[in-house]
C-alpha cells in the first residue's frame, strides 16, 4: 500500500500531462466574424422566393454569400438578385430534384426551407393533402440533402445543413394532422442525418419556429380565435418575425456552431417551455 501511494503522484502527474496535451490538441481557433465566414461561401436555400426563405436569402446575401435560390416555377418568380442563381425545381419530383441539386456542384451550406401546409381536420385528411405535405416537407428534404451531402463529401467540405421544422412537430394543434406528421418526420430525419453525415464532418440541425409572421402567416393567423390560444402560451407575448428565424439559421450555418449537430433549435418565445 505504501509503495502504491508513493507512485500515485507520478501517475497523477502523467495523467495531467496527457490531459494537457489532449486539451492543446482540441483547442479550436476563435470563430471568424460572421461577415468574414459567409463571404464567398455558396449556400442553397429552397423555398427562397417568399416568407422565411426570402428573408434567409436576403440576409445571406448581405453577409457576402452566393445563394442558389431554389423556387418551384419560373412563372411568377422574382427576378434573380445579384450573387444568386435561380434553380427552378418541383422538389416533389424524386429523380429531377436529385439531378438538379447534384448538378449545382459543391456548396458550403444547405437550408431546407421549402414547405407546404395543407390544413385539414383529422377526419377530413385527404390522400392529396397527405401526399403533397409529406412529399414536399419530408421526402424532398431527404432527396435534396442526399445530392448536396454527396457533393460536400466528394469535395471534402465540412458543411452545414439546416432543416426548417416547427414547434408543432412536438406539440400538436388541431386541424394540422399532416403538417404535424411531416414536421415530426423532419426532426427524426435531421437526427439520423446528424449521425450518418457527422462522420464526414457535415453537421445537420433543425430550426423549429412557432408561428412566423410572413405575409401568409399574418393572413392565416389573423383570427384571434385561432391565434390567441397559442399566443397565450408564449411568455414573450408575440409571434416570430422572419428575422428571428434567419438569425437562428445563420448561426447554425456558421462556424459559431461547429459543435452543434443533431439539435432542434426552438425559436418560439418560450411556447414549449410551459
Image (cartoon, rainbow, N blue to C red):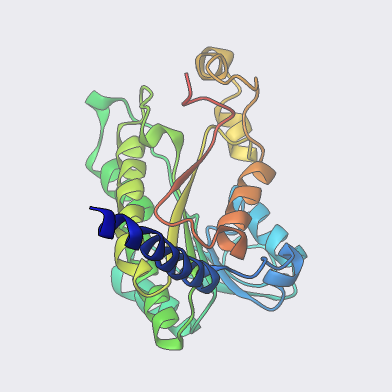
- Which corner quadrant of the image does residue 216 belong to? top right
Residue 229 drawn above or below residue 56: above
- At 52% across and 17% down in the image, what residue appears? 233
Residue 227 drawn above or below residue 177: above
Task: Give the x, y percent position of residue 28.
Answer: 58, 68
Residue 87 at least partly seen: yes
Is residue 273 found left or right of 142 in the rendered image? right
Depth order, front residue of 237/141:
237
Depth order, front residue of 48/147:
147
Task: Give the x, y percent position of residue 87.
Answer: 53, 73
- At 26% across and 58% down in the image, what residue appears? 4
Is residue 142 found left or right of 58 in the rendered image? left
Task: Give the x, y percent position of residue 170.
Answer: 36, 33
- At 45% across and 34% down in the image, what residue appears? 167
Task: Give the x, y percent position of residue 259.
Answer: 49, 59
Is residue 87 found left or right of 250 in the rendered image? left
In the rendered picture of this protein, how many numbered marks are placed on residues? Answer: 0
Depth order, front residue of 143/160:
160
- Which corner quadrant of the image does residue 97 belong to? bottom left
Is residue 173 found left or right of 29 in the rendered image? left
Residue 135 at least partly seen: no
- At 45% across and 69% down in the image, what residue appears? 89
The residue most toward the front is 2
The residue most toward the bottom is 155
Amino acid at each position: 500500500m505504501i509503495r502504491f501511494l508513493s507512485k500515485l503522484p507520478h501517475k497523477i502527474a502523467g495523467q495531467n500531462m496527457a490531459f494537457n496535451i489532449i486539451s492543446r490538441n482540441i483547442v479550436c481557433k476563435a470563430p471568424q466574424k460572421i461577415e468574414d465566414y459567409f463571404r464567398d461561401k455558396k449556400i442553397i436555400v429552397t423555398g427562397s422566393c417568399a416568407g422565411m426563405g426570402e428573408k434567409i436569402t436576403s440576409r445571406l446575401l448581405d453577409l457576402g454569400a452566393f445563394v442558389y435560390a431554389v423556387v418551384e416555377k419560373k412563372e411568377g418568380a422574382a427576378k434573380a438578385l445579384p450573387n444568386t442563381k435561380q434553380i427552378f425545381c418541383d422538389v416533389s419530383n424524386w429523380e429531377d430534384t436529385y439531378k438538379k441539386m447534384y448538378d449545382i456542384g459543391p456548396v458550403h451550406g444547405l437550408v431546407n426551407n421549402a414547405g407546404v401546409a395543407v390544413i385539414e381536420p383529422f377526419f377530413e385528411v385527404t390522400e392529396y393533402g397527405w401526399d403533397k405535405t409529406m412529399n414536399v416537407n419530408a421526402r424532398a428534404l431527404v432527396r435534396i440533402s442526399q445530392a448536396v451531402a454527396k457533393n460536400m463529401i466528394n469535395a471534402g467540405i465540412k458543411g452545414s445543413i439546416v432543416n426548417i421544422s416547427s414547434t408543432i412537430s412536438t406539440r400538436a394543434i388541431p386541424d394540422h394532422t399532416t403538417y404535424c406528421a411531416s414536421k415530426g418526420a423532419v426532426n427524426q430525419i435531421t437526427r439520423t442525418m446528424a449521425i450518418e453525415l457527422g462522420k464526414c464532418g457535415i453537421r445537420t440541425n433543425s430550426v423549429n419556429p412557432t408561428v412566423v409572421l410572413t405575409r401568409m402567416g399574418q393572413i392565416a393567423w389573423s383570427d384571434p380565435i385561432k391565434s390567441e390560444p397559442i399566443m397565450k402560451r408564449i411568455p414573450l407575448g408575440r409571434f416570430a418575425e422572419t428575422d428571428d428565424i434567419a438569425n437562428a439559421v445563420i448561426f447554425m450555418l456558421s462556424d459559431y456552431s461547429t459543435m452543434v449537430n443533431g439539435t432542434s433549435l426552438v425559436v418560439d418565445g418560450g411556447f414549449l417551455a410551459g
